[in-house]
Amino acid sequence: MSKGHAMVNSSKRMLVRVLRGRETGVLLALIVLVVALAFLAENFLSMRNILSILRAVSFEGIAALGMMLVMITGGLDLSIASNMALSGIVVSLLMVSGVPVFPAILIAVIAGMGIGMVNGLIITRIGLGPIITTLGMMSVVRGLAFMITKGLPVVNLPSSFTQLGQGLIGGVVPVPILFFLVVAVVIHLLQRYTVFGYQLYATGGNEVASRYSGVQTSKVTLLTYVLAGALGALAGVLLIARLGVAQPSIASGYEMAIIAAVIIGGTSLNGGIGTVLGTVLGVLIIGVIRNGLVLANIGGYYIQFANGLLILTAVVINRLRGIQS
């Protein structure tokens, strides 16, 4: 068999695996949405608008990949949007104080990891549930962001930093899209080809059985929250770079859009099920709906209604398909 035929067959097998997976329904829904909005909004399929959608979803998408990891273990992180805000404040204050861009970003990401670690320790060591733990942390972290800034925005951010959110690769592709793509690939490889990936699904699928099989489920859960904290922080840093100003109220309400995207992507609320591809598709659906409503001149308050409706629809579909969500 020639090399060309082998590549074609490999591509066909990959396509078949994708079409047979849980992401099929999500992909079809996305296609239907795109076609419908192409008729409703004249400029929807323009390259400029497509890139705008991809850039807009990149920030939530990075955080959603962290949320997906947590949900695969059977957990939830309601503090992720507050993490985004505080991390953005931290990196901004450091830079305006004279700290170089890269060290400032690194410190902000470490701060986000610290938030995730506190969540994980409370859940695994004290035994509190993920919802009440992260709900409390959501208020604590958001409050810290307001306390540190006294409610005032942080301005005069260096252009070398804002280019991470506003810059273009090759004069065409927004930089945040590249970050989103890289993170998605790394998380996919982590899930598919590492021991941690196996233990992640095992912990979410049956924690008791996994523990008896030698999996240190507490450590897996803790590490998952730390990773989610890091990704939330990175998303917050890039969002601030995009906006060019850091406000303590930034990313308010993002946690619902992030959770919606992950659930729409097929991740089970009971754990053990979830993929990077599904999460990316879920994020794109949220972004496409949001963008389409704006282009169709439909009031922004419909976005929250649409997000809630999508969550309920995804949960019902997963239940009907036999996935315990």
Image: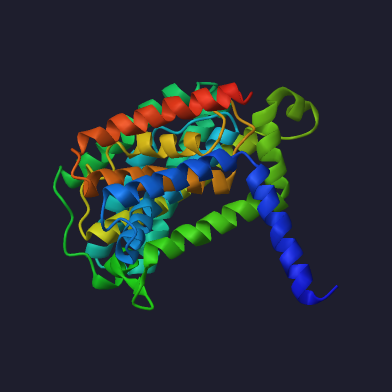
Q: Residue 322: x percent and y percent?
A: 64, 23
Determine the image quadrant of residue 2. Answer: bottom right
87 to the left or right of 249 = right
Q: Nearer the viewer, residue 99 or 313?
A: 313
Q: Residue 280: x percent and y percent?
A: 49, 48
In the rendered image, the quadrant that contains the N terminus is bottom right
92 to the left or right of 215 = left
311 to the left or right of 300 = right
Q: Residue 122: x percent and y percent?
A: 50, 28
Residue occupying the point 48% across, 39% down: 67
Residue occupying the point 32% across, 63% down: 46
Determine the image quadrant of residue 176. Answer: bottom left
**Residue sitting farthest toward the bottom:** 170
In the rendered image, the quadrant that contains the C terminus is top right
Q: Nearer the viewer, residue 284 or 72?
A: 284
Q: Nearer the viewer, residue 27 or 308?
A: 27
Tell me, yes or no, if residue 297 can be seen here.
yes
Q: Residue 94: x percent and y percent?
A: 28, 60
164 to the left or right of 31 = left
